[in-house]
Amino acid sequence: MSAVELAPQELRTLVAIADEGGFSAAAARLGTTQSAVSHAVRGIEGKVGVVLFERGRYGARPTAAGARAVAHARRVLRMLQTLVIETRGVATGQVDGPLRIAAFRSAALYLLPPVLERLAARHPGIEATVTVVREVGPGTAGAVAEGRADLGIATFGTSSPIPPELVGDVLLEEPYALVHPAGHPDPRSLPLVDWTENCSSYTRAWWAAQDWIPAATVRAEDDGAVLSMVSSGLGMAIMPALSLTRTPLGTEITDLGPERPTRQVGYVTTPELAATAAVRALVRELRSSAKPQVGTG
């Protein structure tokens, strides 16, 4: 098969349709007409030989092949942007440009702020933005694979494996602990409060061996809501250290012993972005960051 080349504007068209959910909205974003977008998509599909979008009365959504094409398009456009930034950086000696980070909630709240503060002090030209992504399904690693983020703070070894095309490393291993209403005489007898993201990170063998842990009877949206419910006396929870960095008044943390479960937290990025100055600078700061401390706030 002969080589197929797509122009940057064709890549922008694919991304705009996926982001906006339709040809008309994509045309408005691109400053062109719906017919021009439709014509461009037909041309792109002709080049690659597959249908990239399902058209319907409610808009357009990528097919499986289209989703892969859009992910590649985002990543290629990001590298074209990086080409200009890093070339200028050779002349100026500065590390500049945008840096998009995806992180689950507790990492965004407690792990990243001191890291980004040090990064800004050393490299004021880096424009870091953080998007909170739920660590379920594709999670933060999926955001990187799809080209929506340059680096993701991800959990390793869960039921949602890291996509094989990404690179990264473990930064810390955080223990789980029991959090419960302060002063309760038998916290293990309380109902279990849980949230969806927590489930994917359990050390399952440990969890299954604990006959004192009931099925969750109270479900919350995130770890902050779990802590609020526990502080209100609605139950106990088993949570990782990052989530317990600042616990509300009225709660108490109890260690689960030497066989307690842990989870690994690290970073993931793409091979091409791993070599860029901004991502390397962020990784250096992440590696030098202190491990999270469990305490009350």
Image (cartoon, helix red, strand yellow):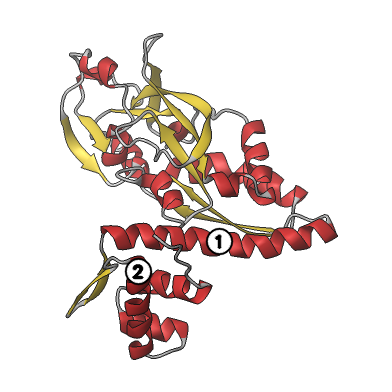
First in sequence, mark 1 or 2: give its number: 2
Give the left or right position of residue 50, taking residue 29 as reference: left
What residue is rendered at 38% in x and 81% in y? 40
Can residue 230 be seen in the rendering of this structure? yes
Question: Badge 1 local density, few (<14 within 10 Å), some, or many (20+)?
Answer: some
List x then y, in percent, for residue 199. 27, 33
Q: In the image, 225: left or right of 95? A: left
Amino acid type at circle 2 is Ala
Alpha-carbon span between mark 1 and mark 2: 16 Å
At 55% from the left and 44% from the top, the residue drawn is 271
Q: Residues within 10 Å of mark 2 (few under 14, many from 20)?
A: many
Question: Which residue is at the front of the view, 216 or 246?
Answer: 216
Q: Amino acid at mark 1?
A: Arg
- Residue at the disc numbered 2: 18
Marker count (numbered): 2
Q: Quadrant of residue 100?
A: bottom right
Residue picked out by circle 1: 78
In the displayed structure image, the side of residue 271 where residue 240 appears, left or right = left
Q: Residue furthest front?
A: 1
Q: Is residue 247 visible?
A: no
